[in-house]
Amino acid sequence: DNGHTNFHITFFIDSQAAIRALSALCASCKLVHSCKLMLNKLSSRCKVKLCWIPSHVGFLGNEEADSLAKRGALNYERSPAAFVPRSMQAFKSRLRDKLLLEHNKIWNKCVGNRISKLWFPEINTWRSKCILKLSRYQIRKLMPILSGHCHLNYFQFKIGKSESDKCIKCETEIETVEHFLLRCGSYIFLRKELFGFFELFPSDMPTLPPEKILAFMEASGRFSEEEENLAK
């Protein structure tokens, strides 16, 4: 920025990606934005042209630039100015991955939450978003079966509100969430209709669509308003 005007300035660049980034309407990162600002400022006084040239074909200036770039890469610790900063998007992505990793470590170390961990063996942001897209009423209906704190007999017996923990339909197994949803013989046709199988497995639980879980609960009759009122 020495104040010269009316010069014809040509930048020879061997990176087509760099030229496309500088020619785009919106800058893809802070570095590109800074370059565009400097080029716009320079072009207000001089005629500026960006010209692509093939690399490694003997252009003297280009070969010298490559040599300097390699030297700078080798000495980046002693030359902080040569360091190319990461884009904000890359920083956010790396931070999000790190937070998710820490969240999973905490979740895995958490004692209890047996049923919730069947639904969420690891933190799954996509599945959480699917649930949050439901209405408030649907989420309220879904939460008991996701936590296991519902009026199926296993939990009701634990808190002293049922005389038996056996399934009231088949009367052969303890009425846990897994028994009710995955294998109770009284719901095999309903299970086939909604999920495509007569019997499911615990490993299937994280993949079951929330809407179909709600439909199963409603069609089974075990989570009707009358049943809920009797369990209270």
Image (cartoon, helix red, strand yellow):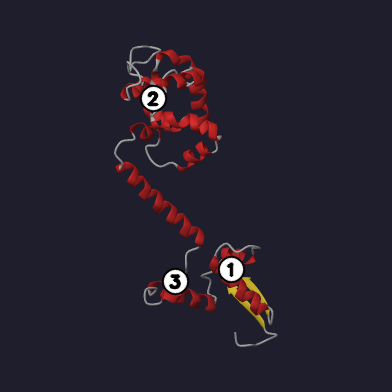
Q: Nearer the viewer, residue 71 or 158?
A: 158
The structure residue drawn at horizontal position 58% and vertical position 72%, both measured from the top left corner, is 35
For label 3, the crowd category at 10 Å Cα-Cα, with few meaning under 14, some 14 to 19 and many 20 or more, is few
Secondary structure under the numbered disc 1 in the rendered image: helix
How far is disc 2 from disc 3 in space, using C-alphas? 55 Å
Give left or right: position of 107 versus 195: left
Give left or right: position of 150 versus 19: left
Q: Please state the horizontal and vertical placement of residue 46, each as a whole percent of the image.
A: 68, 81
**In this view, 160 is above or below 104:** above
Q: Report which residue position mark 2 lands on.
A: 177
Q: Nearer the viewer, mark 3 or mark 1?
A: 1
Which amino acid does the dot numbered 2 rest on? Val
**In this view, 80 is above or below 29:** below
Q: Report which residue position mark 3 lands on.
A: 83
Which amino acid does the dot numbered 1 rest on? His
The structure residue drawn at horizontal position 38% and vertical position 34%, both measured from the top left corner, is 116
Secondary structure under the numbered disc 3 in the rendered image: loop
Marked residue nearer the N-terminal end (2 or 1):
1
Marked residue nearer the N-terminal end (2 or 3):
3
Q: Report which residue position mark 1 lands on.
A: 33
Q: Quadrant of residue 171?
A: top left
Marked residue nearer the N-terminal end (3 or 1):
1
Q: Please state the horizontal and vertical placement of residue 107, each as a whole percent of the image.
A: 34, 43
Give left or right: position of 55 versus 46: left
